[in-house]
């Protein structure tokens, strides 16, 4: 008996792969699709503005009833005032997966060149409608309009319509319009929460949102202070593996191994390069392109294990800073107290990262049996999978590593905790990129950063408690002022009740100089 195989083999393009597996990019159902589309387009808009030093103005509109026979179809449009996209790059930027300007060692909100294009792909397969892109660069005299679809088999853009017209104003930026199948009623809470948290993490942005019911929400810019834009840097030697080292070898223009190490990596100079070359026992004058696979593997292993390198620099990271975090928490949450801390750059597996934390307490924040946690990675709000995130493991009141009693926090409490991680290699737990993995170095930095901010909260709570205690003592004394003033006026006969009452009141206020009681005079009159 002979067995023959009829299996057929073929390759998939990146577009066809994500067409078949759209849930990997967050488009698992109509509810998640609305949220994910808004998120991807807003993040692109913010990267096109704040990464280039432009104060963002972002307009988001979701429209319903755009196709009469399809009530489940929505038109989502997002406009920014960013740097714009050159017309020759627009088709690939929106209709070719894994084509991006983000494949450098520099922090951006998105990393893979997927998000907006998967939204385009999802819209195309659920509605059959193309994406419309309008864009103009800062120095251009024209505005360009494209209607695009994706050739799924070939992962190539299909230009259905292209036109341009003269720019009459100084507008620059990009506007994207996209039809998708969605469920607004169920997606509504997540979309509003996402925009709220985006306004917290980017208080230097003006965000205008109009929903399908024509409700308009305006998150007004509360500061003009912006984070420093990230700079592209060379790779750290401990952060490369065999394949990335092979790519560096193929692309280098250097002609010797020594020059290759010095020119292509950060933190390697004359002395360190000599040490590495002696460890691998390869001629320093060898052309790096002549290295065998075995030699490249040995070099990668040596770079990974050598402990004499300086830590990676943080130039390629764009952290927020304490003032921006405070401004965002104050403007949106209206608390009575805020504190924020930014840690120095740290390293895991050769990748630098920065952790920031903020706490907001009291004011308009509601009481809760556990802290309201706001998680961000590279300025992106993380709304799903909170309980599996390493940050929740730290701040959770019952079993977390931070014991809130030590910081004078008694539950229920009006407490919000913000944690922001920025890195070019955020260790997400899954492909959904909604929770951070339990990496020991990152966990330690998050805990220390939250504790730094919590110490300021503790000092505030203790101070506030003392003020309350002083106020209570003052009120107890004030209760007796009318009787004392009356008695003294009778005894002295010459002194008036009003004069004695004012004098006693001044003595009390001087004694309890820190008390903050509104209408102290009214308290006396009410007692009378």
Image (cartoon, helix red, strand yellow):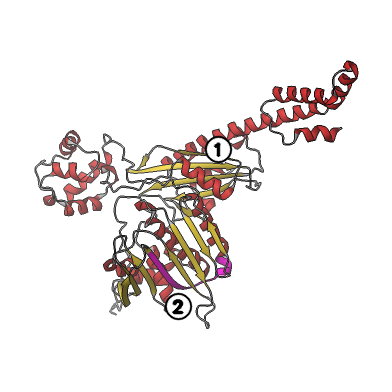
Circles 1, 2 touching at the beta carbon (< 8 Å)? no
| Residue pointed to by mark 1 | 402
Residue 113, image quadrant: bottom left
**Which SS class for mark 2?**
helix
Mark nearest the camera among 1 and 2 is 2
Q: Which sits in the foreground, 116 or 427?
A: 116
Verify whether residue 91 appears in magenta: no
| Residue pointed to by mark 2 | 127
The x and y percentages for residue 306 are: 26, 37
Q: Residue furthest bottom?
A: 69
Residue 286, image quadrant: top left
Q: Which sits in the foreground, 392 or 509?
A: 509
N-term mark: 1 or 2: 2
**Residue found at x 52% / y 63%:** 209
- For the C terminus, the image quarter is top right
Residue 294 in view (yes/no):
yes
Q: Residue furthest front?
A: 494
Q: Is residue 30 above or below residue 392?
A: below
The x and y percentages for residue 131 are: 39, 73
**Which SS class for mark 1?**
loop
Verify whether residue 182 appears in magenta: yes
Residue stretch rendered in magenta on the structure: 174-187
Q: Is residue 158 above or below residue 432?
A: below
């Amino acid at each position: 008996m002979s067995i023959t195989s009829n299996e057929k083999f073929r390759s998939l393009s990146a577009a066809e792969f994500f067409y078949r597996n759209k849930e990997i990019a967050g488009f698992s159902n109509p509810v998640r699709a609305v949220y994910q589309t808004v998120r991807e387009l807003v993040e692109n808009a913010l990267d096109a503005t704040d990464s280039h030093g432009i104060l963002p103005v972002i307009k988001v509109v979701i429209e319903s009833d755009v196709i009469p026979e399809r009530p489940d179809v929505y038109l989502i449009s997002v406009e920014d005032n960013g740097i714009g996209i050159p017309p020759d790059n627009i088709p690939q930027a929106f209709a070719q997966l894994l084509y991006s300007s983000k494949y450098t060692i520099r922090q951006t909100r998105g990393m893979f060149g997927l998000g907006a294009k998967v939204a385009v792909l999802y819209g195309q397969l659920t509605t059959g409608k193309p994406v419309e892109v309008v864009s103009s660069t800062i120095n251009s005299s024209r505005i360009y309009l494209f209607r695009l679809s994706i050739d799924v088999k070939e992962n190539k853009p299909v230009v259905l319509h292209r036109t341009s017209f003269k720019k009459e104003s100084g507008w620059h930026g990009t506007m994207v319009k996209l039809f998708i199948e969605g469920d607004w009623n169920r997606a509504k809470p997540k979309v509003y929460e996402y925009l709220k948290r985006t306004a917290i993490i980017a208080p230097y942005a003006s965000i205008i949102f109009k929903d399908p019911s024509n409700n308009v929400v305006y998150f007004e810019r509360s500061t003009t202070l912006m984070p420093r834009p990230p700079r592209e840097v060379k790779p750290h030697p401990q952060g490369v593996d065999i394949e990335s080292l092979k790519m560096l070898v193929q692309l280098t223009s250097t002609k010797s191994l020594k020059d290759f190490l010095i020119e292509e990596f950060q933190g390697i100079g004359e002395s360190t390069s000599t040490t590495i070359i002696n460890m691998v026992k390869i001629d320093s004058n060898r052309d790096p392109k002549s290295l065998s696979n075995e030699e490249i593997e040995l070099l990668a292993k040596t770079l990974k294990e050598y402990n004499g390198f300086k830590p990676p620099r943080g130039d390629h990271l764009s952290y927020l800073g304490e003032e921006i975090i405070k401004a965002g928490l104050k403007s949106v949450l209206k608390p009575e107290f805020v504190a924020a801390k930014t840690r120095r750059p740290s390293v895991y597996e050769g990748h630098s990262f920065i952790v920031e934390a903020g706490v907001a307490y009291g004011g308009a924040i509601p009481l809760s049996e556990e802290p309201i946690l706001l998680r961000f990675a590279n300025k992106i709000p993380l709304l799903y999978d909170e309980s599996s995130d390493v940050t929740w493991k730290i701040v959770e009141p019952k079993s977390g590593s931070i014991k809130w009693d030590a910081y004078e926090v008694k539950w229920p409490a009006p407490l919000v905790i913000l944690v922001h991680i920025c890195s070019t290699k955020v260790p997400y737990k899954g492909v959904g990129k909604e929770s951070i993995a339990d990496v020991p170095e990152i966990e330690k930095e998050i805990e220390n950063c939250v504790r730094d901010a919590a110490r300021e909260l503790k000092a505030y709570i203790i101070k506030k408690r003392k003020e309350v205690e002083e106020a209570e003592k003052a009120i107890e004394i004030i209760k007796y002022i009318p009787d004392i003033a009356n008695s003294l006026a009778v005894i002295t006969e010459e002194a008036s009740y009003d004069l004695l009452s004012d004098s006693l009141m001044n003595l009390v206020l001087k004694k309890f100089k820190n008390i903050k009681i509104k209408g102290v005079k009214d308290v006396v009159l009410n007692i009378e």
